[in-house]
Image: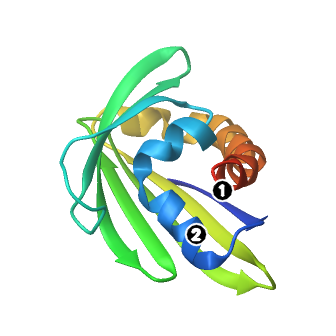
Amino acid sequence: MISVERILVVGLPLPELVAYLADFAHTEEWDPGTVACVRLDDGPVREGARWRNTSVFRGRTTDLEYRLDVCERARLVFVGENRTVTAVDDLRFSVEGTSTRLTYRASLTFKGLAKVAAPFLRSEFERLGDGVALRLPAAATARRT
């Protein structure tokens, strides 16, 4: 398994940031690997909501189907899967003045032959984590109305 964690302070109140990040379609705005993310169901965003996330990694395009597994006031957990990997994005929030402190942890568990490559991919996932840390605060505050 590969885990990457970043702690960010985002200039939005906690409820606004949680609402923004609960809609996983917004990953197009803040995740440097995501090229498309489409909601697969209708209705309000709540536990069980699903998205198809298309990303590019090492020049290859891959799709994962994500679902929102935990949707709480100060925590969101998304689980994405395809035949080669299970990805878990665990987002935890706390108030920091008028802003929000976000602890973002992405964990990837590879399946089958992909397990062999996992140790060699850590540095690339760390680089993606750095990209998230740079892009997410600006993307979230730009959405503020």
User: Which three-letter amino acid code belongs to the residue tagged 2?
Assistant: Glu
Residue appearing at x 27%, y 62% in the figure: 44
Q: CA distance from mark 1 to mark 2?
A: 8 Å
Where on the picture, by quarter, is residue 98?
Answer: bottom right
Residue 144, numbered label: 1
Residue 1 visible, this orientation: no
Residue appearing at x 59%, y 34% in the figure: 120
How far from the left and from the top, in percent, is residue 40? 21, 42
User: Which three-letter amino acid code belongs to the residue tagged 1?
Assistant: Arg
- Above or below residue 1? Residue 122 is above
> Position of 119 compared to 63: left or right?
right
Circles 1 and 2: CB distance less than 8 Å?
Answer: yes
Camera-side residue of 133 and 49:
49
Label located before the other in sequence (1 or 2): 2
Residue 92 visible, this orientation: yes
Residue 93, numbered label: none
Camera-side residue of 23 and 93:
23
Where on the picture, by quarter, is residue 103?
Answer: bottom right
- Above or below residue 130? Residue 37 is above
Tag count in the figure? 2
Residue appearing at x 65%, y 34% in the figure: 124
Mark 1 residue element: loop
Residue tagged by mark 2? 16
How far from the left and from the top, in percent, is residue 32? 62, 33
Residue appearing at x 40%, y 67% in the figure: 77
